[in-house]
Every structure is written in C-alpha cells, then in structure tokens.
Image (tube, grey):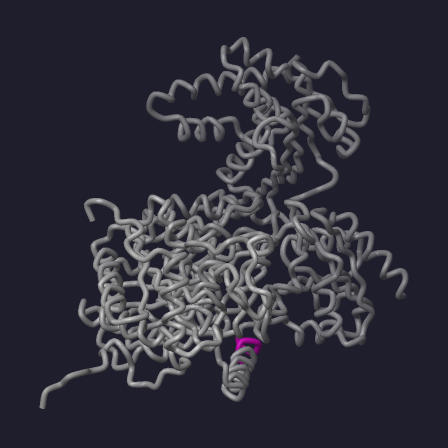
Amino acid sequence: MKKQITISGFGGQGVMSIGKSLVEAAVAEGLHATWVPSYGPEMRGGTANCEVVLSEEPVGSPVFTYPTELIAMNLPSLHKFEPNVTPGGIIFVNSSIISEKVKRTDVKAVYVPCDTIADELGNKKVANMVMLGAYIAATGALKQETIRQMLIHMFTGPKAKLVDLNMQALERGAACLEG
Amino acid sequence: MAKELWKGNEAIAEAAVRAGCKCFFGYPITPQNEIPEYMSMRLPQVGGVFVQSESELAAINMVYGASASGVRAMTSSSSPGVSLKQEGISALSSGELPAVVVNVMRGGPGLGTIQPSQCDYFQATRGGGNGDYRTIVLAPCNIQEAVDMTQEAFDLADIYRMPVMILADGMIGQMMEPIEWHPIPKREVPPKDWAASGRRGRAHSNFITSLRIDAPDCERFNRALEQKYKTIAEKETRWEEKDAEGCEILITAYGTPSRIALSAVEELEAKGVKAGLFRPQTVWPFPSARLAELAAQPSVMAVLVVEMSLGQMLEDVQLAVQGVKPVRFHGRVGGMVPSVEDIAEQAGMILREVR
Amino acid sequence: MTTVYRKSAGLQDRELHYCPGCSHGIIHKLVAECMEELGVIDTAILVCPVGCSVFAGNYFACDTIEAIHGRAPAVATAIKRTHQDQLVVTYQGDGDLASIGAAEIVHAAMRGEKFTTVFINNAIYGMTGGQMAPTTLLGQHATTAPQGRQKELHGSPIRMAEMLSTLDGLAYAERVCVADIPHLNKAKKAIKKAFELQLSGVGFTFVEVLSACPTNWGMTPLEANKWLLENMAAYYPLGVIKEVQGT
C-alpha cells in the first residue's frame, strides 16, 4: 500500500490538520508516513496545501507530482490538481462550496458536503473531520478506531465532549460513500 | 522503541537539548523559526539559556561567548542569516571553539525565496567566511538523520574544537515524519581546560583570541588547522550507498534530493535499469575516495549529480571522478524541488546518450 | 622596607605595548585594582575588543576573551547568562562600541544584561591609524577627515552614555576621565561602583572614560591631557549620567 495524497484549500479550512491526522494515525498503525506543507509568508487566508505519503515501505521522496488521491476543499484546488491525479485515483470534493463536478472520467469522484454537515452538527470547525471520515471510508487506508483513539488522547478534561462531535463528523463523512 | 511524529525544525531543537546544549541564540528567519521558538520554551525547562538576539551577527557572537567560556551552545538560521553569521564562524574556527550551527537553506541569492534550496553548499563546504578554515558539514536527508546528526554534532565540535554545521534544507525543516529517539553513541570528549570561564585557582589565565598578529605564529596556527582537517577527513568522512556496486548510472545527491533520487533509483530498477545511489552524509569532508572507486567500476557509464542548486556539489563530484566517467547534472533552483520523474528521465536520457 | 607602590595583582607582569601618554595603561590599572579590591580576579571574565586594547588578554590576570570588532556585548551577554555569579566586563573603544558595535551595545543595555562595559572614548580610531570615529569632535582632524569633522558631512559626535541612559535596562552610567589625579581617583570610584552594582545584580552598568590618544591627535602627552579637559570634557560632560534609585 502506498498513498500519495494532496490536500488543498483555503487557509483556515483545516487542510494541514487533515494531513497531520492522516500521518499521525498511520504512524500509530505502524506505517511509514511523511507530511510536507506548503509554507508561505501569510499566517491566515490564502491557499494552503500539504502532501502526505502513507506507505508500508520507508518513504523515499516525500514530494510527488502525481497524487493517488486529491482532497479539494475549494474550487481553485480542484482546478489546480485535478489533472495530476493518477488514473484510477480518487478526487474528494468539498461539495458544500464546490458546485463543479470532476471532469475526468478515469478517476473516481467522491462528493462530500463538508461544511453543510459540520453546520448540521453545530460546529463549523469539524468540516475537515467530515472529509477525513470520507477519505478513510473510501480508501480503507486507515482504521476509524485509530482516529478515535487519537481524539480521546487529544481532547481531555472539559474538552472530552469534542471526541463525540468529531466521531460524528467522521461517521457522517463516511456515510457519504454509501449514497 | 515507539515512533513519534516530529516536525523537522522542532526535532532538531529537541535533539540539541538531549545532546546537552545549554544555550541557544538566534534571530527569526523563515523557514527555521520553529527552532528558536522551541528552544525558547524548552531550554528554560532544563536550566538553559535562550536569547533572541538583535541580529544574526549578535547571535553567532553570543555562541562565541558561551563557547569560549566552556558552555555547549548552538544557533540556527537560514541562508541570508547564515551569511551574516560567517563573521562569527570564522572567529570560532580561529579561536578553536566548538559550536553547532544549523542552516535550514532557502533559495537565493539575496533575499531569494523561503522555499527549500541547497544553494549554500559552496559557502558551507569552503569555509564561508574569511580565512583558510573548514567546518564539519553534516547533511541529513530526513528527520531521523537530522536528529541523530544534531546530537553527534556537539561531540564532534567538542572533540575537534571547531564549528560543526548541520546543512539541512527548508523541506527537512518544515516536513513531519516519524522518528525514534534511540541512544546516540557517546564519544570521548576532552576536558575544556582551555575555556575562559574564570581561573578558579588555575595557575595561568586563559586567553581566547582569533588574532595572531605575528606572521610566523599565524602560519604555524594555519598549519595546525591543516593537520586537524586532515585528521577529520580520515576519521569522520561518511556516506551511504544503495545498489551503487555494479550499477550503470550512479546518481549522487545529498539531503532532500537524495531521498527523491532514491525513489528514482527504485523506479529505474523496476524498469530494469541498473541504477545506484551515492549519498554523502558529510559534505565536508567529502567522501571523494569512495566515490572515485565507485565511478571507476567498469559497469558505471555515467554519474548523475542531482541538487537544488545550479551545480555546487557537482564540482566536488567532478574533482573526485577526475574525468574517468562522464559527470552530468540535474538541478532545480530558486526553491523548486526536483521530481522523481525528472530524475529518472534524466538518467534514462544520459544512459542512451553515453551508450 | 615600606612598600610605596605595587603593581595590581589584577595585571600580569608584562610590559604594555601602548604609546607614551595613552590612557589605556592607566585604565587597565584601574580596572585591575578594582577587581583585586573586590577579590574577583580568580572568577572575573574580561571581554576585550578590536582596537589598541586587542592584546588586553596578555596584560590582565583574569581569564579574557577577545571578541570580534563591536561584538563584545553579545559575547558578554552569553558569558554572564551562563556565569551569573561572576564579574563579566567588556572593555571597548569608540569605534568598536559606538560604530560597528552600536547595535550590540544598545541591545545589551536594553535587555539589562548584568555586566559592566568600560568604554574608552578617545575620539579617534587608534590602532588603524587615526581615522574618524563617531565620537570625533567637530573640527577635529582625522586621516579620513583631513579638513576636520564637519557637521553637514559627518553629523555631530555621539554621546553614548546619554543615549544608553534612555534605556530602562541601564542601571548606572557615569562619564569620567583620567587626565589628572583627581579625575583618575573619580574614575576608579566609578569603575568600582559599576562592578559592585553588577555583582548585586541591578542591571547593565556603563562607565565611559574620556581618554587621550596623543599619537593620533598629533600632540605631546601633556598637550593631549589639556586638550581633553578643554575640548572633550566640554562636549561630553563628566559625572553620573544615570543611576537608578534604590541601587
């Protein structure tokens, strides 16, 4: 198994943290993984993307031209990276703010209304977790349980209630694959 | 041992603390800011000293002060900042003072870009500042190696009483990957009886200086440095190889491009091309002898050097190979990173051309 | 036999290389005597500059570190922070401190680094041969200002003690000179006071010593001392510039 994932969107959409969560979960499952951020002078706003490699073998190049999966959280990201996805790969589209459809026919498209679901759950911040849930369900690259353990570790004390919220977000994202 | 996920810059900082670094002096510059930020949080926890200096000049001279008074010290910066630090690196070399300097390289010249680069190779391996000196230059290719090398750097600096540079690039500083905090072999480090830390009963006073105004005296000192550098070249030269014996095309790269080149080698091998990788871990001293030996193998048809520069390590490779085999170059500059596909394609083209 | 004079134990038994009439020798002696009287020769660390006192490490009995031009305050910052109970002193000239090392001295003072700077202001670059310093007086001749320093071209001389005294981190600043015995005695008191304040941990302490450079001023030693009192002391007022209350 080797995944090369490009995750891209506006700054503030939690793009970097989707990547970090994937890598953290991969490490917890004993996989090799790398996370490379795009970094720029702006602290907020603008575009942000990161490149993640998950692999059973040690990772050579942490950067790549052709992702096996693209997570597009906004329209410019879809336009920029759609042509590069390897044939047979998957493009995840945040359909809450991207109304266009994937043009390529040699890749699978998964539409996830991340922001809409997050709003329904009452917290806009979990939009990226919705997408993470969809990614895990579609690829089977990682176990949802690993993410849950990470969340339990991360949210303690008064923040413990956020575990359930994030798990709901993951499950709602996963459910998008069933439709 | 459990693997932990670390960001490169923070891992380098933590490694320094674990190696007994007691002082950090630095000035903000992208893409290495996580090092001083981490140190400002971490050093006070272990009774260490962190100062955000007024400039890179001040930072390296603070390192000089700490080191001259016998304390393990470090600074980090990125390319333009390391240029400013050359004044102090030259003085540290002349005062024979140990120090660890991290350069998380970005594209240049001038202010250049904040994206990763290897454009400071000449500066790092040829001394960098005024005078006939060298620094030991360790070039990690991933975060694990950055962590290991940073810890080893402090011992090397103390053993040889000289600055040791960790030559990383913006990619290593900014990326995250899992590492293990395994024990680093401790080396015997001589006592710092030369340090100007207060006499405390010592019969004579210690005087640390980089001034030797008497020419014969200054020549004697330079000769002693020459001898020290020869010893280091004999004892501390390091490299790694992958399928380099019996290969047809020998790809040579260090740092981030070397791990990209490793993927290219695997891709080429999958297509039936006999590709090998030679990766210097010390770029000064440069592993010339082994590279010459590998290039001279009858199987090798060409050497391909890959860098994030216009061709700087290329010159060391050419010096090592001595024209015995064709040496070709593939470089990306200005913050651009070479791709696996480009390296593999270049290798294929070169092989077709030289056959 | 009665001992009437004894060289300070703070100095090594060596002949100084300074020119006749140069103030460095006297100031070395005062610094050494203060160290001796405070009983800190064995623990003190002195940072010397680039300039005529570049060889100070050959003269002082304590451990010494020769800094790169202007950087003594940065060097001393690290030493004092890692040797908090020891006397740390920088000894710097005007080119070193007020020109190339202006940033280092300002920021050390701003941070309130707990070391002492002894600032030798002789209004000229001595070691390199009489070039204009930031402290050269208006009208004063220098090898890089052959017509004399002009306000329109070179600006007015910089008063470092006053400038640094605007910073909260500075606890004590005094300007002194060693042109005659009464002034010399005051100078020694100031240096000793700065050292004592440093050891009590109040903040950055600074003593500016107006000094003579007869060689580069083109004067005899006696003329130089007279010129110093009449001209330098007129532009750079002697006395305590700042002393934080409660210290």
Picture layout, residue A54 above or below residue B185: above
Picture layout, residue A44 above or below residue B123: above
Q: Residue B343: horizontal and vertical position, in percent?
A: 77, 53
Residue B265 found in image quarter? bottom right
Between B163 and C98, the one lying in front of the other is C98
Picture layout, residue C223 above or below residue A139: below
Residue A70 found in image quarter? top right
Residue farthest to the top, as pictured? A120
Between B341 and C196, the one lying in front of the other is C196
State the quadrant of the C terminus of chain B. Answer: bottom right
Residue A19 found in image quarter? top right
Q: Is residue C70 left or right of residue C13?
A: right
Picture layout, residue A88 above or below residue B300: above
Q: Residue B336: horizontal and vertical position, in percent?
A: 72, 47
Between C178 and C107, the one lying in front of the other is C178
- Does the magenta segment cover residue B234? yes
> What residue lies at 83% left-to-right and 69% top-to-bottom?
B326
- Does the magenta segment cover residue C81? no
Majority secondary structure of magenta residues: helix
Q: Is residue B144 left or right of residue C58?
A: right
Q: Residue B86: horizontal and vertical position, in percent?
A: 56, 63
Q: Is residue C80 visible?
A: no
Q: Which residues are magenta?
A: B231-235
Q: Residue A119: horizontal and vertical position, in percent?
A: 55, 10
Q: Is residue C49 left or right of residue C34?
A: right
> What residue lies at 25% left-to-right and 78% top-to-bottom?
B202
